[in-house]
Image (cartoon, helix red, strand yellow):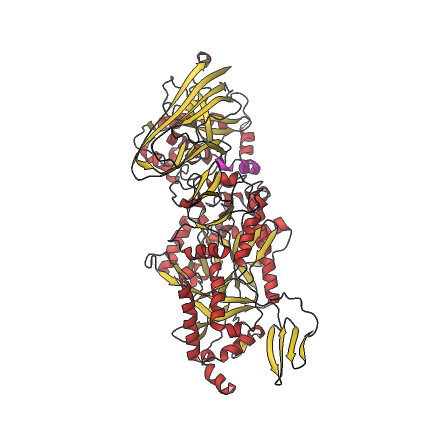
Amino acid sequence: MKTEYEVVYRTHNTYAENVREAFFSFLILPCENESQVVRNVTMTNSLDAEVFQHTNPFGFEVTNLYSVEPFTEFEFQMRAIVEKSVMPFPLEDTLPVEEEQRLLHDHSFYLENHLYLGFDHYTRIKEAYRPKLLMRQPNQGVYEYLQQLNNFIFDLLEFDPEPTHVCTSANEVLKLGRGVCQDYTHIFIGVARLNKIPCRYVSGYLNQGLELAGSAVMHAWAEAYIPGFGWQGFDPTNNLLADAHYLKAAHGSDYSDCSPIKGTLKTNGKQKTNYGVQVTPLQGAENIPQPVQTSVQA
Amino acid sequence: MDAAVRQNQTSEVFSNYQIPPTFLDEVFRAPGQVHPHYEAVYRQFLEFTKDEFKELNEHAKMSFFNQGITFSVYSDKAKGVERIFPFDLFPRIIPAAEWAKVEEGILQRCVAMNLFIQDIYSNQHILKDKVVPAELIFSSKNYLKAMLDIKPVGGIYNHISGTDLIKHSDGEYYVLEDNLRCPSGISYVLSNRVAMKRTLFQMFRQFNVQTVQEYPQELLATMQSVAPNGIDAPTCVVLTPGVYNSAYFEHAFLALTMGVPLVEGRDLYVDKNFVYMKTINGPKRVDVVYRRLDDDFLDPMAFKPDSMLGVPGIMAAYKKGNVNLINAPGTGFADDKAVYTYVPDIIKYYLQQEPILNNVHTYRCEKDDDFQYVLENMDKLVIKPVDESGGYGILIGSKASKEELSEFKNLVTENRRKYIAQPIMNLSMHATFIEGEDQFEPRHVDLRSFTLLGKDRQFVLKGGLSRVALKKGSLIVNSSQGGGSKDTWVMAEDGAGMSMKQSGSLEQSMTMNGETMTMGPQGMSMGTQGGIAEGKGI
């Protein structure tokens, strides 16, 4: 079963003074994978600068542009059609607990996934916070644990865009007890990694119309590795599994690998940024099952 | 003046010389007796009076001042103060045979390090085989995921290495550090040689010393050898952070002596994944960048987003193979002082050879038993942070106060991965002219060597920078910590060297590399004394 979405990303920046030189990088294109096909990509910018691409260290396409024409206003828009197929969830076919743990502790498995097992600014969790977080029980399967973790973090934090910003670390969020999708995701990643489960940061788009938190802008969720199954998306902000409503753009170790826009500008004054996304189901949307709420099994 | 009288008078610059009892003296083997390779220089120095020596010393200092060879120190008190790098006139002499072994060892080490860096950023065989612990690499802040799967042209990462060596009291050379992140100091090597020639040319010309002035051309050839594919006449540049950098003089010096542009980040830009230089004639494509800018600042799109010193997009251009960067970003995990412990294993792993140069035994505070040992024996050890350079943040246990020791115990306990400890090494000592005392006294020295690796080419500079700890008893030789330097002479050939003598009244003969050229009333003749020498010509 397939669903088609039209995805539009648009940013509009205005500057108080002339920008004399600018370099922008966008990591916003929906990616292609086994559940996503991307077609009809168009990108426009108000400078009419020719864009150029490169792939980032995680294999995702970055769109760049360079301009020396002075400007005080900049608009960039990306439009694409994404064909999303429904992915299976790892329900019955998970491995026995010992087998899962043997794999997670395997040396070459660690080497292959080390970028998703380390701790850095965003994902390091202080010793002091650990006792109050949910860790995997000795006899618990990875998938079951991660569903509980998703639920746990959803309950732990209160959604609030006010106190945090793009540089907020997991420790700061734990102290505040509130944050946005990026913050929920970093904590999920940090805790999963403490349990030796490879976990990565995902940025992308969320089907609008379900009134989920984070759908008006680019959304963030986590993908964790379930031994014997593969990567599975978890959205702790909404307490959901990432399903056919989730359109992935990129993944990385944490936010620093996925920030949608980066730029270096030569200008003096202040700037204002206005950005938003539109995700419109085109056809087959009525067939998508309602999102699966992760439930806690006692 | 009669030579004997002169000698009596003048040896006063050496008369109070105390041969250090516990350290190796590179010059003297007994009071008034020098090692054979110092014999000729020592005899020459005895010719000078104390006042003459003072004058020569001033002359040499002026040579640096006039050339504008200065550096500045990053510390709280003396921020931004320009200093002249103290230069000592007594050259350090390394016999040809001794150097040959050192050079072989340095090259072996640099080649192995290059293979190591390449492996870490591609297949990670050495980690799979558990020769080096993976956590040690992954936890290094200089291990860059942006470098994973990048294949630099020519397969070279550490184009320029500055291996630091010391000579221990056992007479052996030990490697103290592998500096793989654009090491500095080469401009002093070249300027020291110039100052030496300007000050003591009459003496210098009598010795057959290996040259150093070819370094800039060797560096340029190294850069050209790793130019992007299909570029025949590559445009090379030196990228500097700017005039406020402590090594700005060197950046300018290298650009000038290589004959390439010196640029700052704002002079370059990236468009369509190619790097261009802004010139008055419009954009000019740049192919090879010798960047004297730390990885963090190189590209705000890939690393520190607020860097204004770098070039946005240059990492993407590099990944596409449209520009080459020297050294490659991310080499710093390999010269991390905790990884240093494993270098002998790294050499064996990649080259199937025994390491030629010794490693200093290193305690990694991360390991429990090492950590315990370090805490208990801190007063006998040197404690170093693993990722700093320039001698900052080091504690020498035997010289530290109780407060300093307890402060360091806390620092180490808080961040064990960050610190290593080494036994205090007995750096060799070398006669050095001490201003104020106006005589020669022994001072500790080390040696920074310079190695260039290019595509199918290798070059080790003959000699390097002999750094002197000018403070009495001090072991820290870094220029930023009150060190000075010496010209380092690697002899082209041991034994005969070159000498001139006038026999009789009409005949003059010159012996060079064992070949004697005689000029006299009978004309000119050339002959070899005792077989043909293999040393390189001058």
- Relative image position of residue A267 (x, y in whole percent): 33, 39
- Relative image position of residue A225 (x, y in whole percent): 50, 29
Quadrant including the C terminus of chain B: bottom right
Q: Is residue A136 left or right of residue B226?
A: left
Nearest the eye: A29 or B413: A29
The single residue placed furthest to the right in the displayed view is: B531
Residue A133 at least partly seen:
yes
- Relative image position of residue B456 (x, y in whole percent): 61, 50
Q: Is residue B205 left or right of residue A73?
A: right
Please give the count of numbered marks on the rendered protein. Answer: 0
**B473 relative to A116, above or below:** below
The single residue placed furthest to the front in the displayed view is: B281
Residue at the image point whose x is 48% and y is 69% from the top:
B196
The single residue placed furthest to the top in the displayed view is: A286
Residue at the image point whose x is 51% and y is 43% from the top:
B323
- Magenta span contains residue A118: yes
Residue at the image point whose x is 55% and y is 56% from the top:
B218
Nearest the eye: A131 or B300: B300
Q: Is residue A27 left or right of residue B324?
A: left
**B473 relative to B284, above or below:** below
- Magenta span contains residue B41: no
**B96 relative to B49, above or below:** above
Q: Which residues are magenta?
A: A105-120
Residue B343 at least partly seen:
no
- Relative image position of residue B444 (x, y in whole percent): 47, 67
